[in-house]
Image (cartoon, grey):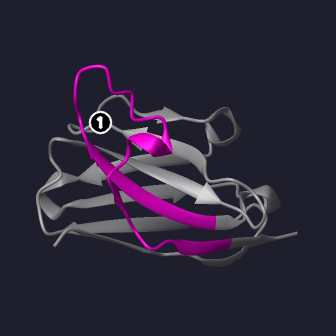
């Protein structure tokens, strides 16, 4: 049974940092895109960033570029999201996801992803 489990969320003041982790189990994800999405109350799920299977091809939405960084440790089947200079608008539930890398697949859309975690809440106060 494949599982993705996020952790590391919490309450932080604006300007602070958090590091989220996503531990995968049930299979190896070395050949998979892994990504972070987020969803704020009343809003649609939003792509945050994704990383290729060999830690290449990192891609981020403009609003987090320079502040967030995704990394992964395939040996540990774990992905991380380092979030710095947090802003109140970063407040959301953050989800990790995974999908097998295939030709023509960008890994930028939630529709592409097969596996999802349960989410971890990040709240950034003023």
In the rendered image, the residue lying farthest to the right is 126
Residue range in magenta is 93-122
Place residue 43 in its image quadrant. Answer: bottom right
Q: Where in the figure is residue 58, as x and y percent of width and height?
A: 41, 33
Looking at the image, which residue is at 11% across and 62% down?
27
Q: Report the number of discs.
A: 1
Crowd tier of the residue under label 1, counting other residues whose Cα lies within 10 Å: few below 14, some 14–19, many 20 or above: many
Whether residue 95 is in magenta: the answer is: yes
Looking at the image, residue 59 sits to the left or right of residue 113; the answer is right
Place residue 97 in its image quadrant. Answer: bottom left
**Looking at the image, which is closer to me, 71 or 26?**
26
Place residue 13 in its image quadrant. Answer: bottom right
In the rendered image, the residue lying farthest to the top is 104
Q: Where in the figure is residue 64, as x and y percent of width and height?
A: 64, 42
In the rendered image, the residue lying farthest to the bottom is 11
| The N terminus lies in quadrant | bottom left
Looking at the image, which residue is at 50% across and 71% down?
119
Q: Where in the figure is residue 3, as x and y percent of width and height?
A: 26, 71
Residue 82, relative to residue 59: is it above or below?
below
Whether residue 3 is in magenta: the answer is: no
Look at the numbered disc 1 and give the secondary structure of its residue.
loop
Looking at the image, residue 68 sits to the left or right of residue 20; the answer is right
Looking at the image, which residue is at 49% across and 38% down?
109
| The C terminus lies in quadrant | bottom right
**Looking at the image, which is closer to me, 98 or 114?**
114
**Looking at the image, which is closer to me, 112 or 117?**
112
Residue 96, relative to residue 93: is it above or below?
above
Check disc 1 and report the residue beneath it: 52
Looking at the image, which residue is at 47% across and 66% down?
20
């Amino acid at each position: 049974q494949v599982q993705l489990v996020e952790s590391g969320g919490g309450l932080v003041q604006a300007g602070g940092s958090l590091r989220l982790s996503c531990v995968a189990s049930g299979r190896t994800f070395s050949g998979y895109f892994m990504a972070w999405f987020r969803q704020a109350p009343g809003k649609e799920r939003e792509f945050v960033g994704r990383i290729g299977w060999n830690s290449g091809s990192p891609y981020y939405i403009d609003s987090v570029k320079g502040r967030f960084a995704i990394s992964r440790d395939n040996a540990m089947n774990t992905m991380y999201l380092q979030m710095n200079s947090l802003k109140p608008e970063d407040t959301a539930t953050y989800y990790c996801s995974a999908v097998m890398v295939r030709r023509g697949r960008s890994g930028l859309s939630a529709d592409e992803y097969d596996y999802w975690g349960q989410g971890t809440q990040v709240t950034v106060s003023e």
